Amino acid sequence: MEEQRELTVLFYFASDNPLAPLVISEIKAIKDAGFQENTSVLVYFDPMEKNVPTQLFDVNRDRRKEEKTFIGDGRDPFVRNMAEDEVDPEELTADMKKVLSASSTVTAFNSLANFIDFAIQKRGAKNYILFLIGHGMIVGNDAFLPDDDPVSAITLSQLETICEKFNQNDARLRLLALHSCSMSSIEVAYQLRGRADYMLATQGTSFVNGWPYRQMLKKTLNQIDRVKEKAREQVRKNNPNEQEAVKNARVAEAANNARVDYDELIRKLYFLCMHNFTDFMNAGYSCDLVLCSLEESRLNDLKQPLNGLVSLLKKGLAPPVSLIKDLVLLSHWEAQSFWSENYTDVWDFCDCLARRCRNTSAGLEKVAANESIIAQLTNIVDRCDEVKNILAPEETARRSNAVVRQADNCGSEFQFARGLSIYFPWCEPLDDQRATFQSAQDDTERPQREAKSKKILENYSEYDFTTEFGDDSWFHFLLEYFRQTKREQQDLPQERFLSDSDRAAPRVVEALRIAEKTFLNGVLKKTPELKKTPEVGGDCTCPSIKNYPTYTDRMLRRFAITPGALRAFIPRDHDDN
């Protein structure tokens, strides 16, 4: 009796870009982790060089024919070639053949979708783990894992569609690992709620070689092998005739039904990544890592407190002179931010705003100020605390039900990060045309894909995080925030000239027209609001407005590290990888 595959691990390297050379060592690391009889590992690799085909690997395919399980190097390490693992062309589906033979005609979405379909059909399992590696920052840009050939990318809605493919026939996507920059956001988590058990990602920079794939895969293979072997041994122990126990298939059945603790496994994978990240401090980099639960009910709990907070803030922003507006601006300035101030940590913003409202309310009470403003501030504090408690409660007893299960950082740049960011730029995006690529529904009628250009806020208005929250969504708060914090227009110069002489009017108007046209044809031709993800992994070099703590004797940001990251520096008595 053949045992049902327990787990299929998928690695999708969207590397048709300068990331490609760095990816080779990552694929080798995956192969060197070994193999386990109940686990399949598939790798999709899209190289950058022209005329080099996309490749699909069934990792350690040939070695599995000789031995069921072999994890790690063994006593005699050997450098093996990936070519031996290429999937047999006879086994490929029609769609997968097209992806591999004519990748320049297949969009990023269809490439990933066909890879997932192949895995489910040919390497189906009870459980899946999906790693997506490439350029990120999907929120606003709506262009995840961009491909230059053809020019295309995956939208947030399409990413949801991809994840939905796994949840059929009682199978589950246990972990969605987004190895890309700035993917740990509330918009992404809400869109993908219920589509996977967990999401592993970063709020800030993600480095290509930042996740230790060999160790992560070894941990996974070892844990599954221990559970399965324990179940087999128990059956053999209960049957005095071992040979009969093997023949009657009870051993296989027991192993097939043995339960793997995926919650514990994923937590261990998180800490392997976090420990690996700490080494980047040797090069002066700051790092963060987040493990989020995508439990649908918990994320749905955000609606009421967030709607309530947005409603209060919109009302508070409206008056020309507004104390609440000032508190929002100061809290926005103070809160942890990412990528040129385009994204802000949700928990930290709520924490900064609640603290400022509490302090202001206490001060107003002392001077017997108007009770209505104190009541507004108190309500804002309550809504902020409710949002924080859903995302990451400070009480230890409640953390097991939080959206953010683990969030750590080291260095100085992300020391106030708490796990999930939200799109919160300082001003309304101006030249924000961003291509959203949609695959043709009928390839026979539309062989050429059409790039549909949308603005950042148009993309944002279509996310579930907007449409399901109604008029008090974060999107509507942003629109009000942009309106109410914008400075008044400076008087145009023709007003002064016209007051001197009406005869100057035609010349002044024409001069203004020429000056404005010159400017619009030049500087404003391209002013991108969201930076492209860097090729190696460094954030943009724009100066930060954050006044973070510094060392008193040196012009350096003060070092910070979370307890989880600090574990990497604590000596251990044994290695259980």
Image (cartoon, rainbow, N blue to C red):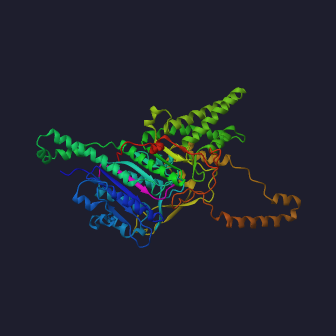
**Residue at the bottom extreme, as displayed:** 51
Q: Is residue 403 left or right of residue 36?
A: right
Reply yes or no: does residue 94 show up in magenta. Answer: no
Work out whether residue 285 or residue 536 is closer to the camera in this orientation and state it.
285
**Residue at (85, 60) in percent of width and height:** 497
Residue 526, compared with residue 374, is above or below; it is below
Question: Residue 170: in sight, yes or no?
Answer: no
In screen coordinates, is 492 left or right of 574?
right
* Magenta stretch encompasses residue 128: yes
Q: Residue at x 78, y 55 (%)?
A: 491
Relative horizontal placement of residue 328, taking residue 75 as reference (left or right): right
Q: Is residue 132 visible?
A: yes
Residue 255 position within the rendered picture, expressed as x and y whole percent measured from the top left: 23, 45
Residue sitting at the far right: 500
Residue 413: percent from the left, percent from the top?
57, 49
Q: Which image quarter: residue 72? A: bottom left
Front residue of this view, candidates 451 and 429: 429
- Residue 155 on image: x %, y %: 48, 56
Pick the front one: 219 or 403: 219
- Region in magenta: 125-137
Q: Position of residue 546 (x, y in %)?
A: 63, 47
At a point 68% along the width and 47% down the height, the residue shown is 485
